[in-house]
Amino acid sequence: MDLFEHAGQKDQQEQAPLAERMRPTTLAEFVGQEHLTGEGRFLRRAIQQDQVPSLLLWGPPGTGKTTLARVIAHSTGASFESLSAVLSGVKDIRETVARAQDRWRMNRQRTLLFIDEIHRFNKGQQDALLPHVEKGTVTLIGATTENPSFEVNAALLSRCRVVTLRGLEQEELVTVMRKALESPKGLGGKVQVDEEALQFIADAAGGDARRALTALEVAAAYGGTRVDKKAAEEALQQKMLLYDKAGEEHYNVVSAFIKSMRGSDVDAALYWMTRMLEAGEDPIFVFRRMVIFASEDIGNADPRALGVAVDAMQAFQLMGMPEGALPLTQAVTYLALAPKSNAVITSYGAARAAVTEEGALPVPLHLRNAPTKLMKNLGYGGGYKYPHNFEGNYVPEDYLPEALKARRFYKPSANGLERELAERYEAFQRQVAAKGGKP
């Protein structure tokens, strides 16, 4: 490297974001993930013994996945190669593997291949890695925010150890920011930040160290040489939320929302709904989940619930945001507090199971359509009893195929308005039993 290249690299480092400048290079500098890097823990022992296997680092953004890969390479003397699953293909994998083979042949130096967002590799790209990971040509370290069980091929998954990283605790984030404030690589003591401001930023970062350092850098630029909580709030405007609409946390929050309504915890349901909205979720997505919920978890215990959900969605489409949050809130509170019954989904499941098990059973003759004389002569529609000709508009009759006469699919709950349906249902069943039909 000549003098000009060295100067250019130095300028580039100084211009890099604070989070990049503060990236640790050793385990001693690394903050967080004590369950992996603490004394006697798996990853520390593997590094100290120079026996690091291929790994899949699974965790939220900003928890140290890339940094850990670099620390491992630096600590074990391995050459560090990095690919992005978004930008790289099979050709890039082959070229990287060829360099790794040359490196080992000429210098007996191992290669650590880091693949960011490995879950974005398709099956062909993941398969291209298999033989090289299996032979040990490269030590693979893949980083992913998605559950590897769903996103990584079983063959590749079986050749790697999955390591789960956690979001950093608030005090750990404060420690990271204090280091950045003091370090010559960071802000070098030029900015004073109040403890309250540090706590606010740490809380807003949601376990993400990169986000905390970026927020600190913005707040320092906004607040000058001294940053208090007010300056931090004005710089950040609002708390940043962990909610990836295409990732696992998306499904976690949606799951918490549905389960809170199902558990009749209206306050929790409102919280998770607001989490989704404030993070930029499409309100129509939330409404669709509520319409499904109204049938699946409430059903006939309160038939009005489905209407409330649909009406609220239509009202939102007329209003838009921010006023549209009102019918959304109205619907959530109603659904959460409504009596619950899952009889709708269990009834359909039971009927579907009968159809699957028994196949297309013949329709009883008295229920068949008879538009022609031939069909009438064959007995189609013969003996059918028209309910409106009988007292109470009801007469006991066999409507199921012979093989299913003893089956009952609907099991109404005793909750809410479904109690009334349950009473009518049992009354009908008693009349059928008295006639000699199904019990």
Image: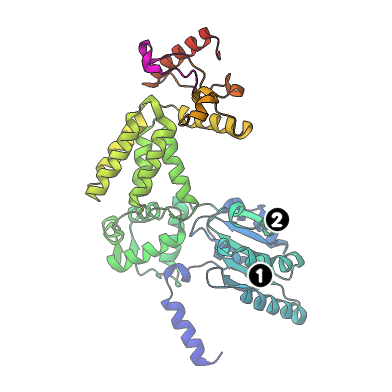
Tell me which amino acid carries mark 1: Leu
Depth check, front residue: 143 or 387: 387
Residue 263 appearing in the image: no
In the depicted structure, whether residue 366 falls above or below residue 74 = above
Mark seen at residue 361: none
What secondary structure characterizes most of the magenta part?
loop
Mark 1 lies on a secondary structure that is strand
| Percent coordinates x, y for residue 21 in the rendering | 47, 71
Residue bearing mark 1: 112
| Percent coordinates x, y for residue 162 in the rendering | 64, 54
| Percent coordinates x, y for residue 71 in the rendering | 60, 66
Give the residues drawn in magenta, as a range: 382-396
Query: Does the magenta segment cover residue 405?
Result: no
Query: Does the magenta segment cover residue 386?
Result: yes
Residue bearing mark 2: 158
Tell me which amino acid carries mark 2: Ser
Is tag 1's residue or tag 2's residue first in the polypeptide sequence? 1
Query: In the rendered image, which quarter is residue 419 located in?
Result: top left
Depth check, front residue: 72 or 264: 264
Q: Residue at x 68, y 62 (%)?
A: 54
Which corner quadrant holds the C terminus?
A: top right
In the depicted structure, whether residue 191 falls above or below residue 376 = below
